Image: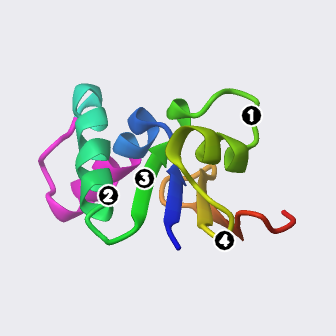
Amino acid sequence: MSTFYVLPSRPLLGERFAGYLGTLFPGLEWAGPAWVELAEVLGAAVARHPDVYVVHAEDLPDGEDVGRALADGYGAEPGDEVIEIIPQGRAGQVTARRRRLGEAA
């Protein structure tokens, strides 16, 4: 079984990650142009785990069911786990929606 993490867009994820890095490295700043790169680095680190895939929201078709889009575009199969990370109002606040493909949502 594989696990698919559906993350926010690269710019949004990178912005949130840059904010966190600012707490670890006071005085350093990661401006907007670095946000996409930060998101890519984070996604690559996560994808090093076996059978784990990172998909960003902007890579999925608008309006299509996430499970269907993952099956059609990324080879997800029934039984694979999908974890959607949904950012909330404040930085650092997220909701994680978990399900297995082929099960009722």
Foreground pick, 30 / 65: 65
As drawn, 59 above or below 90: above
Cα–Cα gap, marks 4 and 3:
17 Å
Cα–Cα gap, marks 3 and 2:
20 Å
Pointer 2 residue: 20
Q: Residue at x 40, y 33 (%)?
A: 11
78 magenta-colored: no
Pointer 4 residue: 79
Mark sitting earlier along the chain (4/1) = 1
Pointer 1 residue: 64
Q: Name the residue type under label 1.
A: Glu
| Residue 69 as seen in the image, left or right of residue 103 | left
| Percent position of residue 88, x then y | 63, 52
SS class, disc 1 = loop
Q: Name the residue type under label 3.
A: Val
Mark sitting earlier along the chain (2/4) = 2
Cα–Cα gap, marks 2 and 4:
33 Å
Pointer 3 residue: 54
| Percent position of residue 97, x then y | 68, 64
Mark sitting earlier along the chain (1/2) = 2
| Residue 86 as seen in the image, left or right of residue 50 | right
Foreground pick, 39 / 69: 69
Q: Name the residue type under label 2.
A: Tyr
Cα–Cα gap, marks 1 and 3:
18 Å
Q: Residue at x 76, y 42 (%)?
A: 65
Q: Cβ–Cβ below 8 Å for labels 3 and 2?
A: no
Cα–Cα gap, marks 1 and 2:
31 Å
Mark sitting earlier along the chain (3/2) = 2
How crowded pointer 1 is (Cα within 10 Å; few <14, some 14-19, many 20+) is rated as few
Cα–Cα gap, marks 4 and 1:
19 Å
How crowded pointer 3 is (Cα within 10 Å; few <14, some 14-19, many 20+) is rated as some
